[in-house]
Amino acid sequence: MASRLNFYPSIGLPFTGYPTCYVDGLREPPWVYSVSNITNEINNRLAVDTPISISTELSAGTAKLNQTNSAINYSTNVSSESVIASNNLKLIAFVTESAINHSAPNGLQIHNHIVRDIVPDENGIAVDLSNANNLLQVFEGSIDVTLTNELANHSMVFVVQDFGTGEVYQAVEANFDQYLDTEDEITGSPADFSLDNVYPNPFNPVTNISFSIKDNSPISLEVYSLSGKKIATIVDNEMFQQGNHTAQWNAAGHPSGTYFFKLSSANGIKIKKAILLK
């Protein structure tokens, strides 16, 4: 953690003492600590549109609670609506714990989002969104855990940050508690807005894409190659009713390989992978 604390001094925004606050990785000196200043900075950042979207899925197969040396896998998708010229973009994930009972000097007893680990490490993973033909990237990995009920208070926060300026472009949180149930099995609870399945998978040349819509809203469903290039639009900002739906894609004319289906709506972005075998 010390190396991460040293990150901010390295870009000219030092921790000059406590309390010190950064909003989306930014702190413009001189900066006087006050609740009103923090509120203003948060509101200013909320008004800034970001072209970057992040979606992530966690999975743990059929592992049992209390099983040691287990792993939770993550698949995180980073996409952008436009080119970002920065060469310093990184994806970094923080494993956090909440509901920690500890008497602090400021009088707080319960503490949330305490960082327990950094994945893969404090240096992050390079994200290149400088090429218009490569605006979707997929990152996969796993972390070792002991699957106990204490994981209900843990989550992973994935962040895309410019390591040159410190600016955070986007973040998303995935909670571990969705994998813990009363039967001591790892489960995934269905979401109201979800890209449910791609079947058959592998496929040749036609596959079906099932998805669920939370509210009546326009959606888009696009296909990307492994390199991140958009190669097809199945649904283009069309209005869909709340409920379950299925679309179809015919990959005739496309080579064998890995493809990604990106579902977008006002409720977020979901991405699934499929393999075309000819």
Image (cartoon, rainbow, N blue to C red):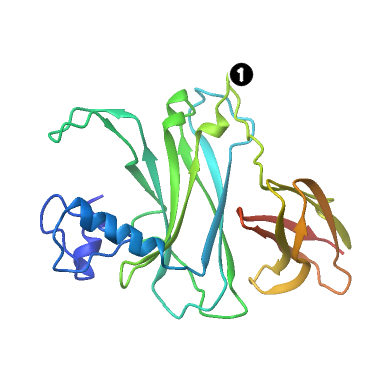
177 vs 119: above or below? above
Is 134 left or right of 94, judged from the image as shown? right
Residue 26: image x %, image y %?
A: 28, 65
Residue 265: image x %, image y %?
A: 65, 58
Q: Tell me, yes or no, if residue 203 can be seen here.
A: no
Is 21 left or right of 252, judged from the image as shown? left
Specify the quadrant of the image occupied by residue 185.
top right
For the residue pair 96 and 124, the one nearer the viewer reads as 96
249 vs 173: above or below? below
Specify the quadrant of the image occupied by residue 232.
bottom right
Q: Tell me, yes or no, if residue 113 can be seen here.
A: yes
Is 237 left or right of 252, judged from the image as shown? left
Where does the C terminus fall, quadrant-wise?
bottom right
Residue positioned 58% across, 23% down in the render? 181
For the residue pair 215 and 209, the one nearer the viewer reads as 215
Number of labels in the image equals: 1
Residue positioned 70% across, 69% down in the render? 225
Residue 27: image x %, image y %?
A: 23, 64
Is 38 left or right of 73, judged from the image as shown? left
Say which amino acid is labelled 1: Glu
Residue 241: image x %, image y %?
A: 77, 50
For the residue pair 240 and 114, the one nearer the viewer reads as 240
Residue positioned 26% across, 58% down in the render? 22
> On the image, numbered disc 1 is attached to which residue?
183
**Crowding near pointer 1: few (<14 within 10 Å), some, many (20+)?**
few
103 vs 206: above or below? above
Residue positioned 81% across, 72% down in the render? 255
Secondary structure beneath dot 1 equals: loop
